[in-house]
């Protein structure tokens, strides 16, 4: 069991590392300008300095994939950050007051937000503020808040019945101090796992929003928009859809495997089962 867990963590970390490396390298180097339109070189086949060929506008596909990785990670980091910053305190508050009106209010509002998918929120925000990367980040972040709130609440409920928390309450320690000193450090591992899984969801959501025109706007490269631009040439030039689709699949698979591996590695119960076997 431990071998599988370590392998999942290793493979997931490697895939995420490759995507991150491509994004970081794109800040200082790309084979070609990813936004340069070259009408004479449209649909250029791979080779001759164009590793993956060129799209229908003559832009280098490999360069677009590199910068698209940067865009994807940027949206994911900000969106997951928004969700964690908003959802974690709400979940902790709800978990520390499980029978109070405040906990009930937080969870009912949480359920209401959960009913609105990121796509619908992006459409609503886009109608008011216009589509763009910021719209996608806010929509994905707000839509992911309920997941963090639920995880934080469930984990907080478990921590609040432990002996050290009961002793702290008996000693007269206030709830904010208990939350900072005892709750947050003990639910941190679960939040890290949730962040990794939510990152994979954010990658898919960003690609979907860009595909539909509510995400990253041109000329900034985006994997989702690369798919959208390639759909009319899907049968004649399938490689235009293959590479961004493969990039999305690799990134999502990497973050999912990383989340599963971290969960198994950080969960003491799973470690104990693994040791017994």
Image (cartoon, rainbow, N blue to C red):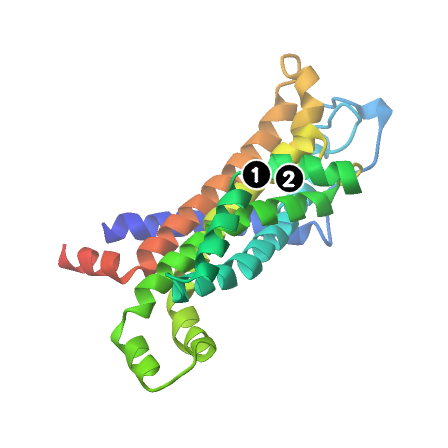
Per the image, label 1 sits on a secondary structure element best described as loop
- Mark 1 lies on residue: 116
For image coordinates 67% across by 43% down, the residue present is 136
Q: Residue at x 52, y 57 (%)?
A: 87
Q: Give left or right: position of 18 versus 153.
A: right
Image marks 1 and 2: residues in contact by CB distance under 8 Å: yes
Mark 2 secondary-structure assignment: helix
Toward the viewer: 96 or 18? 96
Residue at the disc numbered 2: 121
Q: Residue 66 appears at what percent x and percent y? A: 66, 43
Q: Quadrant of residue 62?
A: top right
Residue placed at 27% from the left, 71% from the top? 162
Q: Which of the two discs, 1 and 2, labels the residue nearer the N terminus?
A: 1
Most extreme residue toward the bottom is 171
Horizontal arrangement in the rendering, residue 12 relative to residue 201 (left or right): left
Q: CA distance from mark 1 to mark 2?
A: 7 Å
Q: Could you tell me residue 165's position as x and y percent?
A: 32, 76
Q: Quadrant of residue 61?
A: top right
Crowding around mark 1 (Cα neighbors within 10 Å: few <14, some 14 to 19, many 20+) is some
- The correct choice, above or below, for 250 with respect to 137 in the image is above
Whether 218 is drawn above or below 12: the answer is above
Image coordinates for residue 77, horizontal then vertical, percent? 60, 54
């Amino acid at each position: 069991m431990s071998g599988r867990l370590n392998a999942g963590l290793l493979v997931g970390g490697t895939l995420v590392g490759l995507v991150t490396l491509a994004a970081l390298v794109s800040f200082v180097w790309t084979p070609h300008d990813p936004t340069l339109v070259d009408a004479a070189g449209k649909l250029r086949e791979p080779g001759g300095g164009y590793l993956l060929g060129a799209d229908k506008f003559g832009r280098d596909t490999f360069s677009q994939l590199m910068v698209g990785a940067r865009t994807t990670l940027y949206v994911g980091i900000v969106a997951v950050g928004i969700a964690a910053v908003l959802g974690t305190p709400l979940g902790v508050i709800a978990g520390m007051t499980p029978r109070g009106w405040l906990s009930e209010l937080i969870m009912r509002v949480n359920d209401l937000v959960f009913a609105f998918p990121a796509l619908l929120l992006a459409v609503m925000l886009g109608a008011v503020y216009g589509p763009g990367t910021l719209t996608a980040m806010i929509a994905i972040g707000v839509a992911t808040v309920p997941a963090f709130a639920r995880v934080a609440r469930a984990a907080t409920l478990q921590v609040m019945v432990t002996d050290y928390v009961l002793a702290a309450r008996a000693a007269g320690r206030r709830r904010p101090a208990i939350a900072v000193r005892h709750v947050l450090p003990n639910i941190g591992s679960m939040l890290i796992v949730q962040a990794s899984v939510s990152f994979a969801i954010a990658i898919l959501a960003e690609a979907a929003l860009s595909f539909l025109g509510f995400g990253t706007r041109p000329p900034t490269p985006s994997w989702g928009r690369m798919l959208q631009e390639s759909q009319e040439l899907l049968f004649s030039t399938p490689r235009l859809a293959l590479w961004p689709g493969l990039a999305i699949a690799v990134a999502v698979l990497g973050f999912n495997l990383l989340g599963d591996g971290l969960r198994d590695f950080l969960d003491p119960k799973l470690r104990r089962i693994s040791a017994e076997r």
